[in-house]
Image (tube, rainbow, N blue to C red):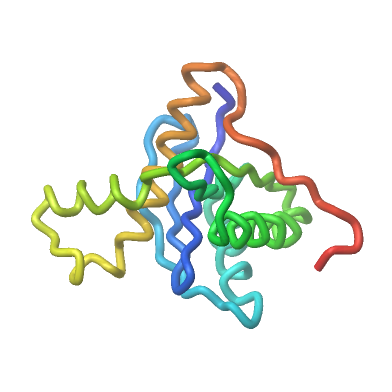
Amino acid sequence: MRPGVRLGIDVGKARVGVARCDPHAMLATPVETVPRDLGGDQDLIRIAEIAAELGAMEAIVGLPLNMRGERTLSTDDAVEFAQRLARHLAAAEVSVRLVDERLSTVSAQGQLRQAGKKTKQSRSIIDQAAAVVILQHALDTERSRGVAPGEAVELNEGTS
């Protein structure tokens, strides 16, 4: 298991949930919900600030595939977001990986419901909870398999 703080990222249309793990990569915890900036980079700038504040070595972005493992419009949005995030984090040498996130939001909603939170009351934290689920799954996968989870996001020259 590679040591180091990682961020978990749940990309939504309106918000981006952010989670982190401890330096020993054992436990994921919520950090912040960042408003999505569809017309600019303020969301990416804030996530880069969080990565710098926490000394993150990697960001794990959830890849929303459908239940058959096929790509959707949300998949394309998350991939594009991950590529843009990778460019923002490149100077700090923070890598970005995409990890299958099927059912992460459903799992997070169930956990919040069990904790007595209503969905309407939880909108502000549901994205953070989903980011925790994504990151914890990635950590557990790496621990059990001994290799980094998902796929690395490669920077393509000439893309913005």
Q: Residue at x 37, y 51 (%)?
A: 130
Is 52 situated left or right of 153 in this image? left
Total marks in image: 0
Residue 42 x %, y %: 60, 76
Closer to us: 70 or 38:
70
The extreme right residue here reads 158
Residue 78 x %, y %: 58, 57
Q: Using the rendered view, name the quadrant where residue 146 is placed.
A: top right
The extreme bottom residue here reads 39
Q: Residue at x 37, y 46 (%)?
A: 104
Q: Quadrant of the C terminus?
A: bottom right
Residue 49 x %, y %: 59, 64
Is 65 situated left or right of 33 in this image? right
The extreme top residue here reads 145
Residue 47 x %, y %: 56, 63
The image shows residue 20, relative to residue 144, as above or below, that is below
The image shows residue 106, relative to residue 44, as above or below, that is above
Is 111 situated left or right of 48 in this image? left
Q: Quadrant of the N terminus?
A: top right
Closer to us: 147 or 62:
62
Q: Using the rendered view, name the quadrant where residue 84 is placed.
A: bottom right
Q: Residue at x 63, y 82 (%)?
A: 39
